[in-house]
Amino acid sequence: MALYLRLLGAGVRARLQYKFDFLFTTVLYGVITAIDFLTVAAILFRYSSVAGWNVYEIALLSGMASASNGLFRVLGSEVTLFERYLVTGEFDNLLIRPWPTLASLLTRNFDIGRVGAFLQGLLLVVVGLNGVGAPVWLWVYCLVVPFAGCLVIGAIYLAVAAAGFWLTRIDELQTFAVNAPLAAVNYPQEIFPKALRWLFLSLLPMAAIGYVPLSYALGKGGSVLGLVVPFLAAGASVAVSVRLWGWGERRYQSTGS
Amino acid sequence: MRNVAYKWSHMVNCVASAIFGFVYIALWQAVAPATSSTDPYTAPTMTSMMVLAQVFAWVTTFFPAGLGIQAGIRTGSIALEMARPVPYFPLLVAREGGSLLYQLLYRAFPLALIFAATVGFPRPASAASLALAVPSLLLGAYVGMTLTYTVGILALWTTEIRWAHWTYHSAVALLSGGWVPSDILPGWLGLVAPYLPFSAQMFYPIRVYLGMGGWREVLIQAAWAAIMTAWCYWLTGRALRRVVVQGG
């Protein structure tokens, strides 16, 4: 962990050498994430609510998912680009290093520019909390949960990367396992057919980040246990993904020449 | 054939695309009225629009980032391509046009089958709507190519175009009318968006197919196709002066 933090610090300092590029990328990713929410907001502008969730409540759902994803894209950007390592044989370079491949991969590059998406997500959370008149405990809770959400989303990215040891091409699987659920968790899950709800609550548990705890916190159903679900989902999904990575790594065959 | 080499990956992509469609269908079914004499965007209409958006997007929108121009700049191959006796812009359009058939057969068609088997694939409003939808879709694809070309050619100034690619994709999601009809966007955006080139990609082909639009929509698309062609030629002329080969 100490090594990871040192490398993270070095990555941040390296990126800050190009101040304009850093600022531009940060603002841009924030704007892009904001435009994505505008699509949701445009629908709410016309219909005022989705299944009883108003624009502020939807902003909370969306913001928690965006902040979680943005945070992981800062810290684990190379995991999201793992197909390249498999196709070019670049993964071989990680295998000959004297520490675990996963540690090498996670510390290879920090996409600090994505902090804009994280901050924009947090901004949406703040707007949502303010709009619903949230009590203090909910403010604290909603600003902590994105860190658990980062682990949930990171674990799914990692599971997809691990699947690459068998499949090689995984970019499309990433679209299925990450991008599609991320689009879905902007909305209350009760609008979806049962099969999709099951998918987003179990196999790809992104609904655990915002929907489950917020259902209880905003008085829309569920129990108080819903508040611990993001943390349980984070622990379980990381454990499964790391295991899957280990299995996959043992059967890795280089594709490079 | 290189596009279908990884069949499993290909099938996953179809399923992922279908899930995006199901998400938007569920959303619109939750908010739009079941029937209405004043609102043209009822739940059944929006279901049809979402199905068509997912399928048509594979023809009009989902091109490789920047049409791969930035890769040519990095490897230096752009110098050879620009030195050919065929102008660079039509060369790329012709190449991308060839892969449209692949997109249609291996991306759009299987996706249409998934929707037909689940929520149903909408029928065209009439034979005339179907006949007009073909040029409308082709014009949409062409405008989409020119916009993607614009993103790609920016690499001659900036080298990196990831930011432009994602900005373009976000603009398409909001302004193309595929997932939110352009004319119901709030305020001035709803007045302007139908006349932006993004609407030519999705909004108009869908409306024409469903009989909600006709020649007027196709003419707007044709106007954008002409404007974007002139723009791309002008931009290519400017870009030629900036080619710096980085390969070696």
Image (tube, coloured by chain):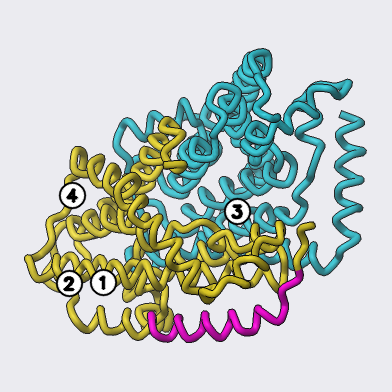
Residue B236 part of the magenta segment: yes
Q: Earlier in the sequence, mark 1 or mark 4?
A: 4
Give the CA distance from mark 2 to mark 3.
45 Å
The chain that hosts pointer 3 is: A
Give the residue type that dot 1 points to: Ser
Pick the quarter of the image with the C terminus of chain B: bottom right
**Outermost residue toward the left in this view:** B127
Q: Are the two marked residues, 4 and 3, in contact with CB atoms closer than 8 angstroms?
A: no
On the image, which quarter does residue B145 sit in? bottom left
- Residue named by callout 2: B132
Query: What shade has chain A been given?
Result: cyan
Query: What shade has chain B been given?
Result: yellow
Give the residue type that dot 3 points to: Val
- Residue named by callout 1: B136
Q: Residue at x 45, y 59 (%)?
A: A55
Give the residue type that dot 4 points to: Phe
The chain that hosts pointer 2 is: B
The chain that hosts pointer 4 is: B
Q: Residue at x 60, y 63 (%)?
A: B69
How packed is label 2: few (under 14 Cα within 10 Å), some, or many (20 or more)? many
Q: Earlier in the sequence, mark 4 or mark 2?
A: 4
Pick the quarter of the image with the N terminus of chain B: top left
Disc marking residue B121: 4
Name the mark nearer the viewer: 1 or 3. 1
Q: Are the two marked residues, 1 and 2, in contact with CB atoms closer than 8 angstroms?
A: yes
Name the mark nearer the viewer: 2 or 3. 2
Give the CA distance from mark 1 to mark 3.
41 Å
Q: Are the two marked residues, 1 and 4, in contact with CB atoms closer than 8 angstroms?
A: no
